Image: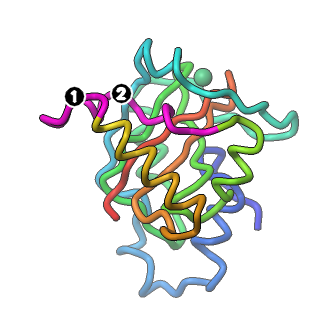
Amino acid sequence: MLSPFPWIINEVWTSWNKSNPTAADIYDGSSPIRDFVLTVVSVNDVRRAPIMPVPPDVLVPPQGTLLEHEKLLNGTTGGGYIGMVRWPICDERLTTLLMESGSGIHLADIESQTGPLDQALLEVYTIDTTDTQDIVYRDWANKLQQMRLRKYGGDGINIFHCRTCGRIYGAYSEP
Ligand SMILES: [Zn+2]
């Protein structure tokens, strides 16, 4: 299925809508993207991010202000759910959700192009906690490793792609 929203890749859109959700499954007709926090990527995020080529034929989310990006996410429709996520903003655009809680593009298919995503987690997660930066990144890397070993499905693990510069970012959501 083709995603009508360039900030959601077709594979995630399909997993959210393949069951042909009835109106009852769709939160009051409102966006499946709930309680998000727009997060402009930091200098360190940009420096660390692995890069995956942007396919030539994809739509690119529009450049805009944070308020405009917020309206786009709130205007998203259809089935599915992602909550309490930090949505990366890169190059003044929404990044595109490639993997949502393990659904969508498989981690292995992304990492086959980028190498390990152990450092892709947004730096903001080290600021929101009393844990050290090492612990925050080790926890993230451990979760990815459990996914690679198929011991963990990826609940709460999300991967985003900037369709301008190709950078890849990781963020947690409500599991
Ligand atoms: Zn970018």
Residue 54 appears left or right of 90 = right
**Which disc number belongs to residue 127?**
1
Please state which of residues 120 and 16 is positioned toward the viewer in this rendering: 120
Residue 137 appears left or right of 115 = left
Query: Label 1 sits on what residue type?
Result: Ile
The quadrant in which residue 116 appears is top right
Residue 172 x, y percent position in the rendering = 37, 49
Please state which of residues 93 and 84 is positioned toward the viewer in this rendering: 84
Q: Quadrant of the N terminus?
A: bottom right
Q: Which residues are magenta?
A: 116-134
Helix, strand or loop at label 2? It is: loop
Instruction: Mark yes or no: residue 31 visible.
Output: no
Tag 2 and tag 1, C-beta contact below 8 Å: yes
**Which disc number belongs to residue 123?**
2
Crowding around mark 2 (Cα neighbors within 10 Å: few <14, some 14 to 19, many 20+) is many
Q: Residue at x 76, y 61 (%)?
A: 2
Instruction: Mark yes or no: residue 53 visible.
Output: yes
Residue 171 appears left or right of 118 = left
